[in-house]
Amino acid sequence: MSELAKYAIKAADIKGDPNSPLAGEGVEEAGVIGDVDGQDGIKAGPIVGHWKHDFTLRRFKLETGATIPAHARSEQEVLFVQSGTLEFTWDGGSLILGAGDTLTVPVGLMHGFRNPASADAITFVVRGAASPAAPQFATAQAAE
């Protein structure tokens, strides 16, 4: 049983990684499952296994009004909204996602996020790489 406990984390113990290129005012990205440090600056773990995952699991927390600027990823990305409301935007469109909703994002699609609601938005993101690449931002200013 104590061996299995190494592969679990309590929600209260998930902490934002200040190295995340998507972190900003009111935005936190935290590693949950990751066997190696990501090319995007996020450290491995805290859950690491004795087996090869070939993906990472991250958690986003967006406070009311917080945004993640337009960016593209070079790996598959699947979003699961756990709680709150998340607006997903891309050139020419947007989707409002709520608790329990799931979205798969095409590789290379320039997209952003916003929390339009009065409660925090908590979203889990699976990225299809053991060491995800850094996101490519639409503008140089967004990356600063």
Image: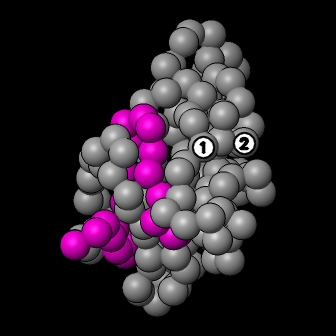
Give the CA distance from mark 2 to mark 1: 8 Å
Q: Earlier in the sequence, mark 2 or mark 1?
A: 2
Residue at coordinates 67% horizontally, 16% vertically from top-left?
3
Label 2: element kind: loop
Q: Amino acid at mark 2?
A: Gly
| Residue 84 visible, this angle | no
Q: Is residue 35 left or right of residue 53?
A: right
**Callout 2 crowding tier (Cα within 10 Å): few <14, some 14–19, many ≥20:** some
**Callout 1 crowding tier (Cα within 10 Å): few <14, some 14–19, many ≥20:** some
Instruction: Please identify the quarter of the rendering in which residue 39 is found.
Output: top right
Q: Amino acid at mark 1?
A: Ala
Q: Residue 67: x and y, percent? A: 52, 76
Q: Residue 109: x and y, percent? A: 33, 52
Closer to the camera, 48 or 130? 130
What residue sits right under mark 2 in the picture?
Answer: 41
* Numbered label attached to residue 134: 1
* Numbered label attached to residue 106: none
Q: Quadrant of the C terminus?
A: bottom right
Q: Which residues are magenta?
A: 68-93
Taking the view exactly as shown, the residue that stands out farthest to the top is 51
Q: Residue 99: x and y, percent? A: 32, 66
